[in-house]
Structure formats: structure tokens, C-alpha cells
Image (cartoon, coloured by chain):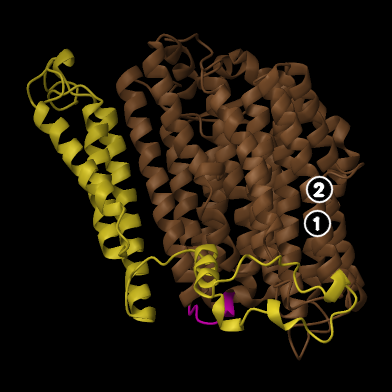
Chain colours: A yellow, B brown
Amino acid sequence: MTRSGAGPTLVLVLAVAVLVGCGVILLLERSLTRILLGVIMLGNGVNLLILLGGRSGGAPIVGTGPVERMSDPLPQAMVLTSIVITFGFTAFLLAVAYRSWYLSGDDEVPDDLEDRQIIRRAGRNEVGALDRGGEGPNGDPEQVDPEPARRRLRRGDES
Amino acid sequence: MRALVPLPVVVPLLGAALTLLLAGNPRIQRATSVLCLSGTLTVAVLLLVQAYRHGPVVVAVGGWPAPVGIVLVADQLAALMLVVSSAVTLCVLLYSIGQGRSETSESSPVSIFHPTYLVLTAGVTNAFLAGDLFNLFVGFEILLAASFVLITLGGTETRIRTGSTYVVVSILSSMIFLTAVGLVYAATGTLNLAQLAQRLDDLPDGVRLALELMLLLAFAIKAAVFPLSAWLPDSYPTAPAPVTAVFAGLLTKVGVYAIIRTETLLFPGGRAHVLLMVVAGLTMVIGILGAVAQSDLKRLFSFTLVSHIGYMIFGVALSTVAGLSGAIFYVVHHITIQTTLFLVAGLVEERAGSTDLRRIGGLARVAPLLGVLFFVPAMNLAGVPPFSGFLGKLGLLQAGVAAGGPLPGVLVAAGTLTSLLTLYVASRVWNIAFWRAPRLATSEPVVQLPRLMVGATVALVAIGLALTVLAGPLFDVTADAAEDLRLRTPYVRAVLPGGVP
């Protein structure tokens, strides 16, 4: 990075590629801890990428060297900001993962509600019955008692 | 006037610090946050008047002139968004105070709701005012960080479960945005939006398209445009009612705002418009079909939220003055209405003990005021004349017809279909939750809803109605804003008065 006037060094480009690649693969996992590692790697990869955007060179302080051999300070300022942001997000994700483990014994990201309902229906071999939100028989909205039992979901099922 | 521009960001941030210090004294804490947001609203209105009369108000933070320093720009679009967002956040804050649970809820030991809420507001206003891409990114991050805290408030199992999806998706979209920022800087050597407007034009077409798509991808995740919207209906409904309401109203619209800004200022006449139109149509239709299938009030509203984002994207994709004007009007309308509906869902939950349509019924007889409060915004959302939803949709559909061609034609048809299906969804909710034989999910119903909650909701319904009455002047403002956006020169000249370096 110190050779002035040169383009981005190949090492940095490769580092970005490896970090982002590994980060994306880890993000695809189900466990929050691995996702967290993925976020860290991806974040660092992106931060390095920003650094690549500016010219490399000496310290950008007037009087320490010729102006045309100075590095571009702006990407460095941006990287500092984004490092802080990535750090904050990492900490929060860590807290979420811990809380999830504390509450449920694992830190897996579960399926979403819809998916689980579909799986449950498939398990009971039900074809998606028309759910009109508990209207009475013959579609009469006034006639709600006695309750149409077959459409009633058990309470604990949903959450 | 210039001194006013940073206030919508600074005041809520300072307020956040102050409310955190005042955590031990809830009464003063609440008063402080209400005061902060009222101040923000006042400043926003002043800025809108100024921007409408004299053009964009620009302030260079730190005194460095434009391309070097960071600028905050309040043009008509930004000021209009500021006004609407601060009005909505103020109402939701009052609602949450009325609910009284925000601080003492199940298990949140410190009263972090108010500080976090104010930080969220600061993030939203910063995103609206940002005059350079990196500041826009920072605005997004501020609001995201606050939203993470709010969506997992209390740390119950459901909230952590849905919150983790939300957090991971949001972080991913931020990473994509950050990558895009880095690449834009590498390609152009600047991040100032006004300067970028010029420099991006000189880039080769391929590079320009790649940057545009990357930014669009990041914003589309935040705005919940169809193929990237799956995270929203699963994560929003579990948060506390006021949080869901403000998220639904504002956070997605910040994404839409960013799309409008980049599409008009940075990439006018770009090649992504066909793509945008296709995803807009899919968002509308698939979103509303999702809503048809739902039986929980909050999830149902989340799907209508996704669906109606399609209208705004449609307007942006048309990229005519009429289309943009319609889109901006629709954003204003939708922020108000969608927030109102979520607040009503909160009231229903409070009154009937649940928002599950299978377990509640006949609320119109039990609580007539609640019925009215639901009916008006629901019909407004569905686009029944003469409400603002109808006017917004009409404006967009007219712009689509005026644009001509097969694709806008299909979009107009999809928009009409979506509007009809929204009406179906709204009347279905009305029939089940409000019209049939009364049934409550709780054995000990609250007889009297807290007055402040009802009052805040009434205020938002009234704002929604005011949008209908004042639609004429509002359309003047949005048309003017759209004109400026299409021209680009007012913005660029205001930021860089000495010409583009």
C-alpha cells in the first residue's frame, strides 16, 4: 500500500475476495453464531474494498511530503466510520444470539410462520382449506356460535 | 433559515441523550421527547415553506464548502418527507405514552424506549436530509441500530426469533449499500450527490448500470420490494404496536425515498426502469395476494404495506413528472395511512385481547369509535373516492396511461386489480372483526381505552382526511418537487453555487 501512484495491490484484492466469499457462505448457515462470523468477515471485506477505492501513498498531511504522493484520506475516514458501525452491529448480533440461546437452548434462525403452517398442514395431509377467518357455516358472518371447530388453530401453534 | 436545516437531526439526538439521563423520571422523560419531536415538526414545516418558496435550503456542516464538506440539503422532497415523518412520529409517540407499556413492559428494566425512539427519528431525518451518499448510509445505520433495539424490545422469545431475521437481513442490505458506496467512490472520486450527478453521467454505461443496480438492490431490501420483501411480514408484527406502526410507516419509505433520490438525481434515464416496473407490478399483486390469505390483523397489514410499496416504485419507474409527483404524493399518503392502521390494530389488541381474526368479532357494536377509526383509513387505503388513497392511485394510473406502451399498461391494470383486492381485504376485515356477532378474545376486556392512545389515532386519521381535503395544494408541492427532481439543476445549483468543479 505504500508504493505511491500504484494501483491497488493484488494482495488486498484477493483478501477482499476471500473475506467476502467466506462471509457470504457463512451467512447462508442457520446458526446465528456462524451468521455472526459471516457478518464479521463480510464487513471486513467490504471495509477493505472501500480502502481500495482511494489512491495509496504517504500520510495525507500537508508538509510531510509532496502532495501528489499522498494517499486519499477520504476512504480512510469512511472505513473508520464503517468499522465502528460493523462493530456495533456485531455486538448487537452477538447479544441476540446469546439471548436466543438463553431462551430456547440453541441459536438457530427458525423458519418463518407461513412455512411452518404449510409444513404442519402437509404433515396432517390437509389441502389448504379456505380460511374465511372463522365465519359461520354457509358463510353467514352473523352465525358464529357454535364455533366452527375445524378451522380453529390451536393457540400455541402459531408462535 | 440555514441554521434550521441540521435541527431535525440534532434535536432528536440531543433529546435521546437527555431522555437517557432522565430515565429515572418517566414524567419529565416523556415531556422531553414530546417537546423534541414537536420542535422537529415545527422546523420541518418551516423548511418546507422555505424550500417551496425559495428553492433548496443547503447547509455545509462544519463550514467546509460543498464538494469537500458534508452538506445537508432540504429540498422540497426532503422537506415534505420531514414534515410527514415528524408528524407521524409525534403521533406515535403520544400513542405509546398513552399505552404506557413502552417503559414498563414485560421485562425491559431500563426505560430505553424513548431514547431509542428519538435516535430512530434522528436516523430517519438524517437520511432525508443527507446531501452525500455516505451520510445517507450513516442515516440508514442510525435508524437501523435503533430499530434493532426497538424490534427486540423486552427480549421475549418471539421477538428474538423474528428480530434475528430482521437484524441479519438489515445488516446484509447495509453491507451491499456500503459496497456500493465504496465502488461509487472508486469510480468517481466523490460522494457528494450533486457532484455525483455530473460525474456519473460521464462513466461508461456498463459501470453506471452496475452501480445503479447495486444501490437499487440495497434500497429495495429496505423498501421491501417484492423478491426482497419476505423478511417484512414475518418480523414487523411481533413488535409492540407503536413500534410496528412507526416501522411500517417510515422505515420502508426511507428506502423508497432513497430510490427516488438515486433514480432521479444520480441515474436519470437509466436502464433499470423496465426492471423497476416489473418488480413494481409483482410487488403490488403478490403482496396483496399475501394479504388476502392472512388471518391476523397485523400480518395482513404488513402484506398490504408490501403491496402498496409497488405503487410508489411504479411511479418512480415511469420517471415522468406526473409519475414522480404521484409517487411522492403516494408516499405521503401511505406513511400516514399505514401507520394509522397499525395503531388501530394496537387498539383492537388492547380492546379485544387479540388481533387474530378468528378470535375476535363485532367490535363495531362493542366499540363504535374503534369501528370508525378502522373504517376510514381502511377505505382510504383501498382507494375509495374521495379519500387521498383514491387521489394518489388516480394520479399514478393517469401517469401510467399517459406514458403509454404495453408495460405501463400492464402496470395500470395490476394497480387497479391491487386496489380492488385491497378493498376486498379491507371489507373482509371489517366484516369479520367489526360487523359480525361480538366476540372478544379476552375474558376481561378493557372497557375504556386510554384516552391518549385514541386521541393520537384520531389525530392521524384526521391527518389522513386532511390529505384528502388539501390534496390540491399538496399535489402542487409534489408536482413542483417532481419537476425539480427531473430537472436536477435546482438541486445541483443549490449545493454547488460556484458551478461543478
Neighbour tally class for label 2: few under 14, some 14-19, many 20 plus, Cα within 10 Å:
many
Q: Position of residue A144 (x, y in %)?
A: 84, 80
Distance between the alpha carbons at the discs numbered 2 and 1:
7 Å
Q: Which mark is residue B426?
A: 1
Neighbour tally class for label 1: few under 14, some 14-19, many 20 plus, Cα within 10 Å:
many
Residue drawn at point x = 75 percent, y = 30 percent? B412
Vertical arrangement, residue B124 with respect to residue B24, above or below = above
**Depth check, front residue: B374 or A132:** A132
Residue picked out by circle 2: B382
Q: Is residue B269 visible?
A: yes
Using the image, name the chain to which the residue with label 2 belongs: B
- Magenta stretch, overall SS: loop
Query: Which region is colored magenta?
Result: B103-109
Is B9 left or right of B323, judged from the image as shown? left
Residue drawn at point x = 75 percent, y = 22 percent? B322
Q: Is-magenta flag for residue B108?
A: yes
**Depth check, front residue: B398 or B449:** B398
> Residue lying farthest bottom?
B443
